[in-house]
C-alpha cells in the first residue's frame, strides 16, 4: 500500500487523473495493463507504447533485486521488490515520450537499465 | 608570499580557469592587525574524481595507465596542494565482492604514490552501493565526515552507500548538527559524489533526498559544492549555492540529458585523455572566492 500511495501522490502532482490512479472503475475504454519484468539489467519490455487518455497499469515483477522504476517527466517512481507485483498507475494526458530508469544501483550493468514509455494519440 | 606567486604562475600555465564566487565572508581579523593573518592563508586543494579503477572497455583503452598518469601530473605541480580529495567512483563496480576489494586495494596502492600525504577519500556508487559501503569502509574509513582547513569548513556527504541514492535521515541529522556549530557566514565547502540537485534524473544524475541537504545549507551564506559522478565540468546554482562537477579520470559522459543514453563519449585516438582531468581549487583571501583550474591527465 505504501508504494501505491506514493505513486498516487506523484500522479496527483503531475496533474494526471487521480480517479484512474486509484484504479476505480473507468469508462474510457478500459485499463491498459502492461506486465513488465525487471531483472539485472533490463526492463522487459523496455519500450512501452500506450494510448493517450486511457488509464495505464504497469505491473512490475522483479526477479532479483529491489530495482527502481523512475519516470521523472511524470513524477512517478516506485521501488520494485522481488516476490510481489508492484503496480504503477497513471493516465497519460498527452502524446509524447517519457524515459524511465532504474534508480536503485543494482550492479555492473545498472547504467544500461532504462527504457521509455511512448504515448500515442 | 612565495607560495602565492607560485600558485598564480601555475594558473597562468593552466588555462581554463573558472572563477566561482562563494568564499565571501573570510573577513580580515576583527582588530585590523596582522596577527590573524596565518588563519586566513591562501591555499589550494586538488579534486580528483571518478577514476573507475578496474574499468575495461573501448571508452578508455588506456585505462590501466590513466590514474597513474594523473598521479604523476599532480606530483609534477610546482606548488603542491594542501590536500587532495577524491570525490568517489574510485573503482569501477563489480558484482564480485572479492574483486571489489582487490580494485580498492590497487587504487589505494597507486594513489599512495602521491607526494601530498593529506588525501581525503569518498565513495561513489560504483564503490559502495552494492554492499552499503562495507568494502570501502574497511579500507578508507567513514563515508561522511567534516574537517577544517585554514578557516574553511569542509563537509563530505555520502549519497551513494544507499543504492537508492539517499543521504538518509541519520546523515541529514548529523549534517544539521555539524552546521549548527558554524557561523552563518562561515566559508563552507561540501564534497559529495552525486549532484545534490536534480541535474538529469532520467539518467540517475540526482540525489533522492538532496533537496533536504540543500535546504539545511541554504541559511549559510558561503556554501560551495564540489562533486563528481557526471564525468564533465558543470556549473549550477541553487540560489546562492554554487555546484561544480569535476571531470573524470576514465571517460567523459555526454552533456546532461543531451541524448537518450548516458553512454561514454568515444575515445579519440588522435587526442587521448580528451575530456579527462583533475582540478585545482584555490581559496583566496583577497578575491573572496574560489579559483578553479582544470588540468589534463598528463603532466605534459
Ligand atoms: Cu536495476
Image (cartoon, rainbow, N blue to C red):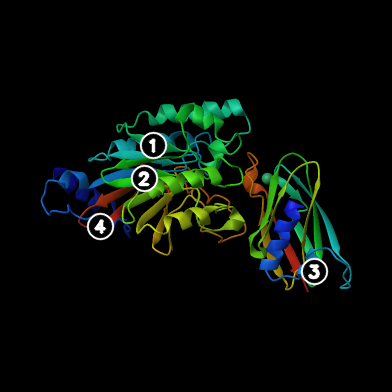
For label 4, the SS is: loop
Question: Which residue is nearer to you in this view: B280 or B23?
Answer: B23
- Could you tell me how far apart the alpha carbons at marks 3 and 4 are, in whole angstroms? 55 Å
Who's the residue at 25% across and 57% down the image?
B288
Answer with the quadrant where ligand 1 appears in the image: top right
Residues tagged 2 and 1 counted as in contact (Cβ below 8 A)? yes
Figure quadrant of the C terminus of chain B: top left
Q: Is residue B36 left or right of residue B248?
A: left
The earlier-in-sequence mark between 1 and 4 is 1
Residues tagged 2 and 4 counted as in contact (Cβ below 8 A)? no
Give the chain of mark 2: B
- Could you tell me how far apart the alpha carbons at marks 3 and 1 are, in whole angstroms? 52 Å
- Position of residue B84 measured from the top left corner of the image (x, y, whole percent): 35, 39
- Position of residue A14 measured from the top left corner of the image (x, y, whole percent): 67, 68
Who's the residue at 74% across and 50% down the image?
A43
- Mark 2 closeness class: few <14, some 14–19, many ≥20 residues within 10 Å: some
* Residue with the mark numbered 3: A19
* Residue with the mark numbered 2: B154
Name which quarter of the figure residue A89 lies in.
Answer: bottom right
* Residue with the mark numbered 4: B288
- Could you tell me how far apart the alpha carbons at marks 3 and 2 are, in whole angstroms? 48 Å
Amino acid at each position: 500500500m505504501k508504494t501505491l500511495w506514493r505513486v498516487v501522490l506523484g500522479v496527483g502532482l503531475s496533474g494526471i487523473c487521480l480517479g484512474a490512479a486509484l484504479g476505480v472503475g473507468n469508462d474510457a475504454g478500459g485499463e491498459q495493463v502492461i506486465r513488465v519484468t525487471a531483472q539485472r539489467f533490463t526492463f522487459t519490455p523496455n519500450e512501452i507504447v500506450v494510448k493517450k487518455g486511457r488509464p495505464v497499469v504497469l505491473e512490475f515483477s522483479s526477479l532479483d533485486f529491489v530495482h527502481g522504476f523512475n519516470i521523472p517527466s511524470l513524477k512517478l517512481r516506485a521501488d520494485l521488490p522481488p516476490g510481489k507485483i508492484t503496480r504503477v498507475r497513471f493516465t497519460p494526458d498527452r502524446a509524447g515520450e517519457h524515459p524511465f530508469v532504474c534508480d536503485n544501483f543494482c550492479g555492473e550493468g545498472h547504467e544500461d537499465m532504462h527504457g521509455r514509455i511512448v504515448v500515442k494519440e | 608570499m612565495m607560495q602565492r606567486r607560485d600558485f598564480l604562475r601555475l594558473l597562468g600555465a593552466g588555462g581554463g580557469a573558472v572563477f566561482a564566487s562563494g568564499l565571501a565572508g573570510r573577513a580580515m581579523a576583527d582588530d585590523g592587525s596582522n596577527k590573524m593573518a596565518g588563519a586566513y592563508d591562501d591555499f589550494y586543494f586538488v579534486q580528483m574524481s571518478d577514476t573507475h579503477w578496474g574499468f575495461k572497455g573501448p571508452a578508455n583503452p588506456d585505462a590501466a595507465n590513466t590514474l597513474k598518469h594523473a598521479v604523476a601530473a599532480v606530483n609534477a605541480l610546482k606548488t603542491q596542494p594542501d590536500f587532495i580529495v577524491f570525490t568517489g567512483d574510485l573503482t569501477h563496480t563489480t558484482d564480485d565482492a572479492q574483486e571489489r576489494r582487490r580494485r580498492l586495494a590497487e587504487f589505494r596502492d597507486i594513489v599512495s604514490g602521491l607526494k601530498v600525504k593529506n588525501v581525503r577519500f569518498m565513495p561513489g556508487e560504483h564503490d559502495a552501493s552494492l554492499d552499503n559501503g562495507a568494502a570501502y569502509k574497511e579500507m578508507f574509513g567513514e563515508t561522511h565526515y567534516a574537517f577544517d582547513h585554514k578557516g574553511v569548513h569542509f563537509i563530505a556527504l555520502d549519497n551513494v552507500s544507499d543504492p537508492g541514492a539517499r543521504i538518509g535521515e541519520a546523515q541529514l541529522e548529523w549534517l544539521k548538527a555539524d552546521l549548527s556549530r558554524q557561523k552563518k557566514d562561515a566559508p563552507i565547502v561540501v564534497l559529495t559524489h552525486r549532484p545534490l540537485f536534480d541535474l538529469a534524473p532520467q539518467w540517475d544524475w540526482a540525489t533522492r533526498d538532496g533537496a533536504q541537504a540543500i535546504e539545511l545549507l541554504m541559511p549559510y551564506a558561503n556554501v560551495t559544492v564540489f562533486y563528481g559522478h557526471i564525468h564533465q565540468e558543470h556549473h549550477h546554482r541553487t540560489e546562492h549555492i554554487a555546484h561544480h562537477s569535476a571531470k573524470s579520470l576514465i571517460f567523459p559522459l555526454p552533456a546532461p540529458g543531451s541524448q537518450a543514453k548516458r553512454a561514454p563519449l568515444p575515445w579519440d585516438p588522435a587526442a587521448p585523455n580528451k575530456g579527462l582531468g583533475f582540478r585545482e581549487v584555490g581559496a583566496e583571501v583577497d578575491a573572496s572566492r574560489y579559483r578553479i583550474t582544470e588540468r589534463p591527465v598528463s603532466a605534459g
